[in-house]
Image: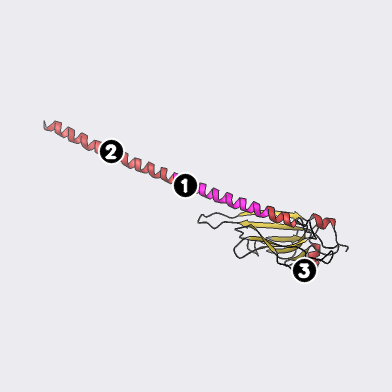
Amino acid sequence: MTRLFRRRDERGQSSMGEVMVTVLLLGIVMTFVYKAIDTTQYAIAGETARLANLDEARTLMAVTTKDLRTATRLVPGTSPFVAASSNEVTFYANLNNTTGGPRKIRIFVDPSSELVAQAWTPDSGSVSPNYTYTGTPAPRYVGRFVTNTTTAQPIFQYFAQNSTTPMTTPLSAADLLAVYSVKVTLVVRKQTTLPLRPVTLVNQVRLPNVDYQPPSS
């Protein structure tokens, strides 16, 4: 009788140990499962944010390069560019000017990291080649999250014909006349707690109107 009870006690102690081992193993497995789920969700969130940055950068690049391609000289022998620096450019452009002369366009990044384009229409009564632009410019919001650093990652670089070396900015009057193409670099990163690297897009824009109207010199 005593032996029977002893066997039952031993059998019960063995079952309890097995249960504890099983629970422990299950806990370890669930820990790995939850960690895998958390890692997957984190990766999905990161990829979503990266794609959002890429979409924003593509929009910014499309608008900026489209505007630059319309740069035009008011008269032969003059530059289409009024001013040109590493993070801002002002130029005359054949952009939506169906009722008058070229517009004057200024593209820059404001303190909120937004890319903005301002457009002046020629003053009423001014005619070629003496267009004037004294009115209030119409602002055009292009996009957000531009994080270029002026020195290491300039937004605009300017090249003379057959040159691979960018001209020193801000451009002098002689350099403004020599601009043949503009390289645009946009570094875009939305503010986020995720440790994401910014998206960088680069495009070098030829200026077809400048080719068509070369300076007399």
Q: Give the residue displayed 18% in from the left and 36% down from the top.
A: 9
Provide the residue span drawn in magenta: 37-61
Mark 2 closeness class: few <14, some 14–19, many ≥20 residues within 10 Å: few
Label at residue 172: 3
Look at the picture and state if 40 lies above or below 103: above
Q: Is residue 109 above or below residue 34?
A: below
Farthest residue to the right: give it.
216
Q: CA distance from mark 3 to mark 2?
A: 82 Å
**Circle 3 — which element?**
loop
From the viewer's side, name the closer residue of 139 and 165.
139
What amino acid is labelled 2 in the image?
A: Val
Q: Nearer the viewer, mark 3 or mark 2?
A: 3
Q: Quadrant of the C terminus?
A: bottom right
Residue projecting furthest to the front? 125
Residue 164 sits in which quadrant?
A: bottom right
How many labels sit on residues?
3
Separation of marks 3 and 1 at Cα, in angstroms: 53 Å
Q: Is residue 50 magenta?
A: yes
**Element at badge 1?**
helix
Q: Give residue 19's mark.
A: 2
The residue that mark 1 highlights is: 39
Residue at left offset 48%, top offset 45%: 40
